Image: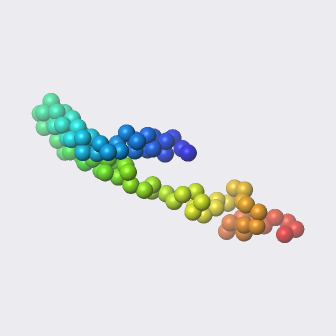
Amino acid sequence: MGLLDDLKGKAQQVIGGNEQAIKDGIEKAGDFVDTKTGGKHADKIDAVQRGASDFVDKANDRPDTAPVADQPPVAGEPRAAGEPPVTGEPRQPGL
């Protein structure tokens, strides 16, 4: 599991069941920054708020990638006995 997958898993655990409270906090924090900057960066702040809220909405969705068992094999990686070679991978001599 990669670092990003690990972080996403931890975020999902934290977010679980608290989506609305977190989104309210994102909104309040963005509004606070917007007032402190005098609206000078409102478009950027709104974009960050939307992105963070979208992340919260998607955090408990299914992962973007298929489970390892459903992914196609990668050339050069070991295969289980009897599996055909991956396209572009040379066959072993004598087979």
**53 sits to left or right of 94:** left
Depth order, front residue of 39/65: 65
Q: Residue furthest right?
A: 94
Residue 32, image x, y percentages: 16, 33
**Residue ranking furthest to the top:** 36
**Image coordinates for residue 72, horizontal then vertical, percent:** 60, 63
Q: What is the count of numbered marks? A: 0
Residue at 73 percent across and 60 percent down: it is 80
Is residue 68 in sight in this rendering?
Answer: yes
Q: Which residue is nearer to you in this view: 17 or 22?
A: 17
Residue 8 position within the rendered picture, expressed as x and y whole percent measured from the top left: 43, 44
Residue displayed at 13% across by 37% down? 39
- In the displayed structure, 38 sits above or below 44; it is above
Q: Quadrant of the C terminus?
A: bottom right
Residue 41 showing in the rendered view: no
Q: How is the image coloured?
A: rainbow
> Which image quadrant is residue 49 in?
top left
State which quarter of the image contains the N terminus: top right
Residue at 81%, 64% (x, y): give it: 92
Residue for point 17% across, 41% down: 42
